[in-house]
Each structure stands twice: as C-alpha cells, then as structure tokens.
Image (cartoon, rainbow, N blue to C red):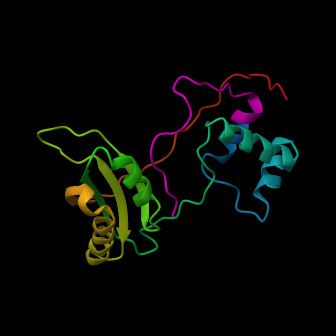
Amino acid sequence: MSVSTFPSERAAGDSYQLCTRDRQLILATQAGLPLTTDPWATLGEQLGIPADEVLARFQRMQDAGVLRRVAAVPDHYKLGYRFNGMTVWDVDDEAVSTMGQRVSELPFVSHCYRRPRHLPWWSYNLFAMVHGTSQQEVEDKARQIRDLLGETCSSHTILYSSAILKKTGLRLKKQGDAPCSE
C-alpha cells in the first residue's frame, strides 16, 4: 500500500502550466494506464510521441508536484479487506510531526494525516487509515499504533467505514491547446 502523509514540500501558490502534450497524457491516463507490457510505449503510440518522452513528461510533472505519484490502486474490497478503520489520535502537539511520520511508515497504514483539533468537541490531531479482513485485525493494528505513540498519545478511537463511496482523482476535460516549450 502506498503512504501519503503530511503536507507537500511544494510551496503554496506555485503553478505549472500544462501544455497540450501534458494534458493529452493526463487525459489518456485518467482511467488508468494501458494494460500492456509497456504502457509508456502504448501511450506514446496513441499520442505520436516516443516512450522516453512520455516518461520524461510524467517525471517532469511529478517533479513539479502536478502529479503526486503513478501507482497501482488495488480494489481492497476485492482483496478481502472489508473493514476500514480511520484511527484518530490525540497526540501531544510537540510530538505529532515526528510521531505522525513514524505512524505513516507502518506498512499497514494507507493514509496518515495531521489535522487541527476542534476543541472542545474534537481533540484528535492525527489520523491513520487502517484496513483489515476483520474488525479484530483493524483493532490489532490500532494497538500497534497505540504502542508506537506511547505516552505522546492521550486518547484515540476508531471510526469504521459504513458505506462504500466512489472516489476518483481529479478529472480534466479537454481544453484548448497550449504550446509545449520542449
């Protein structure tokens, strides 16, 4: 599973101008990469550009922060992971960045975020998503997080998913052309 955590190092307000080819690549991959032995070559053939240029453009967009990552996104329900628990933690403010990084590195944590408290109703400032094939498995993983946080954590709970919501990334629409500088 992938791990995403704490804010990007990219400065707020930075912008990247998509050129026509970049936009074509994003449009061609919004529903996923081609299921071929060489998806970069397949994309290149579709768009009339070499595979190495396809890779270079994706790398440039990733380096600029336009793309976070290129990764497989498994359907965890089809893999048997039917219990999804968002574990929420009340961690000392002085320790939350360090401990959040450590929690995000656990192999079973798929998402880890720091969020502001909303006192007096919500004291939790660290969120870590855990999946399991049973509720017991999720609770066992939460116990491992609790052990890791130690005395930096004063309370926690697990919020279980009650419905499957469709989630997708940003979807671009075809727009006018913008010339590419390279």
Task: Locate residue 5 relative to residue 151 in the image: left or right.
Answer: right
Q: Residue at x 72, y 37 (%)?
A: 24
Q: Which residues are magenta?
A: 1-23
The majority secondary structure of the magenta stretch comes to loop
Which of these two is toward me, 114 or 2? 114
User: Where's residue 31, x and y in %?
Assistant: 60, 50
Which of these two is toward me, 181 or 128? 128
Question: Where, quadrant-wise, is the C terminus in this rendering?
Answer: top right
Residue ranking furthest to the left: 120
Which of these two is toward me, 43 or 107? 107
Q: How many marks?
A: 0
User: Where's residue 162, x and y in %?
Assistant: 25, 59
Vertical placement of residue 162 versus 64, above or below: below
User: Where's residue 114, x and y in %?
Assistant: 35, 45
Task: Locate residue 22 relative to residue 150 in the image: left or right.
Answer: right
Q: Residue at x 65, y 25 (%)?
A: 175
Q: Quadrant of residue 65?
A: top right
Q: Residue at x 31, y 76 (%)?
A: 137
Residue 35 highlighted magenta (yes or no): no
Q: Quadrant of residue 68?
A: top right
Q: Quadrant of residue 19?
A: top right
Residue 3 highlighted magenta (yes or no): yes
User: Where's residue 164, x and y in %?
Assistant: 34, 58
Vertical placement of residue 161 versus 53, above or below: below
Task: Locate residue 114 relative to residue 9 in the image: left or right.
Answer: left
Task: Locate residue 182 relative to residue 57 in the image: left or right.
Answer: right
